[in-house]
Image: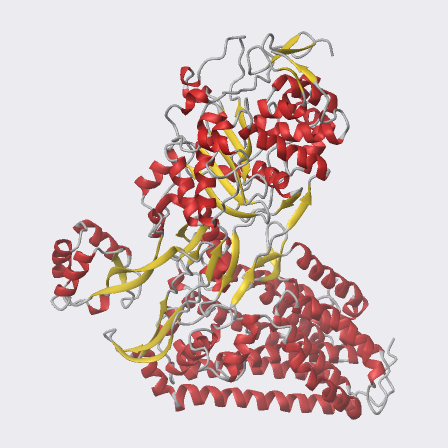
Amino acid sequence: MNVYLGQHEPGELKTRLYIATGIAISIFFLLIMRLWFLQIWKGKEFKELSENNRIRLIRTIAPRGLIMDRTGKTIVENRPAFHLAIIPEDVKDWTKIKKILPNIIDIPEEDIEFKINQAKERPSFQAIKVKDDLTWEEIARVETFRLDIPGIALEIEPRRVYPFGDAASHIIGYLGEIDEQQIKKLKQVNYMPGDFIGKYGIEYQLEKYLRGIGGGRQIEVDAVGREIRLLKKITPAQGYRVYLTIDMDTQLAASRAMKDKVGAVIAMDPQNGKILAAVSSPSFDPNLFASGIDKEQWKNIISNPFRVMETKFTQGQYPPASTFKLITAAAALEDGVITPSTKIYAGESFWFGNKEFRDWKPGGHGIIDLHRAIVESSDTFFYQVGLKVGIDRLAYYAKGFGLGRKTGIHLINEKAGLVPSGKWKKDTYGAKWYEGDTISVSVGQGYLIATPLQMLNAYAAIANGGKLYLPQLIDMVETQAGEIVRRFTPQEIGRVPVSPSNLKLLQSALKGVVNEDGGTGMSAQLPGISVAGKTGTAQVVRLKENLPRKKPKDFPYEQRDHAWFVGFAPAENPEIAVAVIVEHGGFGAEAAIPVAREVIQAYLKKSGVKSLPTNASQVKTFGDRSIGGQETEMQTPEADTAIATKTEEPESND
Amino acid sequence: MIDRRLLLHFDWVVFFLTIVLSVIGIINIYSATLTDGAAAFYTKQLVWLFIGIACMLIITFINYIHLEGFAYHIYGASVFLLVATILFGRTSAGATRWLNTGFVSFQPSEFAKIAIIIILAKYFNTVKIPAKGLSLKDLILPSILVFVPFILIARQPDMGTAILIFFIFASMVVFAKVRWKTLLGITAVSLPSIPLGWHFLKDYQKARLMSFLDPTMDPLGTGYHILQSKIAIGSGGVMGNGFTHGTQGQLRFLPEHHTDFIFSVLAEEWGFAGSFIVLTLYFILILWGLHIAQNAKDRLGTFLAFGVSFMFLWHTVINIGMVTGMLPVVGVPLPFMSYGGSFLLTTMIGAGILANVSMRRFIF
């Protein structure tokens, strides 16, 4: 194995080892020289720097970027907040400070004591924050007493303000103090404990653009902690400006319309998927979070039974009820189960096996075609049609309209809803799919659930000729100088599997719902604007007895139905699509339509749409009706009794 | 079975120097982390030291001929662990360097250094080196062998270790003798590629290099650390501020004070006297290592001892150069003293190899 022996080695290796040793010794001397230079030659200088002229680094937090609506109106901004701090090093008389402070600012003496004790371990030049966000009166008093009690200081910090309060909080989101885990994750980007960070909504999604770049001051201070010299100053750079797709006027109208209601409204430009307004009710005021929410307020928010922190337009999953009938209709037309002229007897109830499936309308609708069935929202018509289409094809079309999967909107924790199928039921419940289940699904009940956003997107696709867009909340991000950093363009994420001629039929039926006699959505008519849309009433509780329908008010709140309206306007050339859900609102027409009207009106008034009324007399009849009032009487309430009423047992004839 | 002659020739110099340096390290880690509260870094490091001593003794008594025999196995295992790190490694602060085995996590990149020293020693032992020196063709195989772990480590990213591996490789190649023309050629080709490499660096790495070239450019970020480190070392003066009395270290002006900047803590608290003694101990160890290479009974031993000595040399030079502001901050720890189990084990294994070669110089 000693192949190398006998060569001219290792003599030469030895020489090179001497050279290596020489190199090592030279390096050793070089390092010793360097240490001698730093520690002995310059030692005194560095000693002074270290002891008398300690260099300190003071961070300055950058103001967050502004958030604007589509028109450039500022909807989130910053204001200066003043904090009172004590710098222990500079304090001459501790007892005096503890005595005077409670008199000039609103803080109990124990709190001051506690905060001082808490900071005992820290170096004495570090300021102790005593009180956050002083009032103007407090600031004035502090300024007056500042010279009498050395050691106190005012610190200015930018603070987030939401001038519109709770109007758009589920979109904009809120800030909160960064937590341990986030700090670990984000240490590279210079986050520190106590920093505020976006926790939800746009504030969270665009944190990296909104945050800005913190600055700092490197200063030399003397032994007492007084600043002697500013070595270097870096001004913080404010975060980027964000333009949202929402229109604040429409948003405000939506927020007003949802006041005292539980549910959600969301509106979109059907031609490009841009969200125009989105309200989840009840809402919260993000201003409460801007300086750290206190325990009491937080408890109030999370103990609210109407789920304040839930974003109902993306996280609320409801049976789409009658609004789903359009999809059943599309499936039936496309699969050739019926033609537009097929007429079916749609009576008071439909018997399947030994079970009765009832229609909402006493007496039924008679022999009707698809158009009328949608206009009048016949249940028995769609029971029969849906049954023929079958669950697998219904599921196929439901998915084709975007149900059962997340739309991909830039908001976290979006829910996907559920499109059931035979296989799904087997996997989940281990039970067989019954045709009775299909009957329920064909009118949007049963296992089927969807978010308001999904229904909105599906109807926007009907309105725009079949395109499903990615719902878009952010228009663009630009620097302070106006340079565009990121622009979000409309993104088509799919096409509904429906032919253009069938889409036309659906559009005209939706128009009929609002504009034809006997239509369930007639109260959605607006002066000068032709509205198209569909109502829905989602059952919350299975009715065990075959009881006559009662008025919603006669039920306990939590048993009342959810009210839906999904539609668009102007019907001919849609500029806005809107979906409304009012939880336990009763009939769709009663609770949801007024909200949709407000939103459509607010937006179209602004965009200056003067679409010609299709029927002049209608405008006269319904034009100047106020919302509420006698309107209720004129409405045609509709409901779907999609669940068998006679027996709790599943179909036994299967 | 252990040959009795081995015990007679046991290398006490290597053994004592490594333990003395490690204990000095633990004393300084104790002081550096005193104000950090809960986590007792020094006790953990003490446990690692005991494991390290055990590893060192085990390595010492396995004849290094076997290291050559298993060179490819060791190398393969090392590359496997690096790949595993990329796939399953734990990411912290933007870098994926840690492999978690359930009860203990370690950095495979540290052990890769030893694997590379062994495999290069094996290569230069077996390849026939012409009188003029190695040609470019002879360098292809070792280059590939080094490049694989190098790139795996560089993309973690762990620039410090990657640079170190390159330095070990370059030293061993030059030591084995390369043709002058080849050497000049490689240098001529690689110099212009440096600007290209710039693009592959992470932002924070670029910032470190830039602030080294001009520390006033970023006094709040990286430049600030270099300045604070220099203040710490300089303010130590001749005799230092005394144990646990270094204000720079205690007041947390120093970054990474128990790992990469441990020498600054030592220099601040023990002054020029302390840093001179410690630096001297390092160089006695390195020179002793080169002495072992001189007297090794065969070429394999010479190359192993040389590789390990130069690993120590580069670590020491780059780390101290870095904390004294002579070199950019690249994240290279100081052997035996910096906090970190994987690194301590690696250096102890290296010391074991030195002792191993040393003890067998009379045994044929």
Residue B69, quarter of picture: bottom right
Taking the image as shown, residue A183 lies to the left or right of residue A147, namely right
> What sort of colour scheme is used for the picture?
secondary structure
**Where A386 falls versus A363 (above or below)?**
below
Q: Position of residue B12 (x, y in %)?
A: 61, 74
Q: Nearer the viewer, residue A41 or B360?
A: A41
Front residue of A231 and A33:
A231
Residue at 17%, 57% in the rendered image: A138
Question: Can residue B193 be seen at all in this image of the molecule?
Answer: yes
In the rendered image, the quadrant that contains the C terminus of chain A is: top right
- Could you tell whether A509 is left or right of A589 in the image? right
Where does the image place residue A641, in percent across and percent down from the top left? 57, 17
Of residues A374 and B24, the one drawn nearer to the viewer in this rendering: A374
Give the quarter of the image for residue A568.
top right
Q: Quadrant of residue A628?
A: top left
| Rendered residue at 57%/26% (across/down) | A321
Q: Does B135 sit above or below residue A499?
A: below
Asked if residue A267 is positioned above or below residue B318 in the image, the reply reads above
Is any atom of residue B243 visible in this view?
A: no
Q: Quadrant of the N terminus of chain A?
A: bottom right
Number of marks:
0
> As drawn, is A281 to the left or to the right of A437?
left
Q: Is residue B106 above or below residue A1?
A: above
Q: Which x, y percent locates residue B8?
A: 67, 73
Seen from this angle, which residue lies furthest front? A616
Nearest the eye: A12 or B150:
B150
The residue under the point 72% across, 63% down is B78
- Residue A323 in the image, given as x and y percentages of width and height: 58, 29
Q: Residue at x 58, y 29 (%)?
A: A512
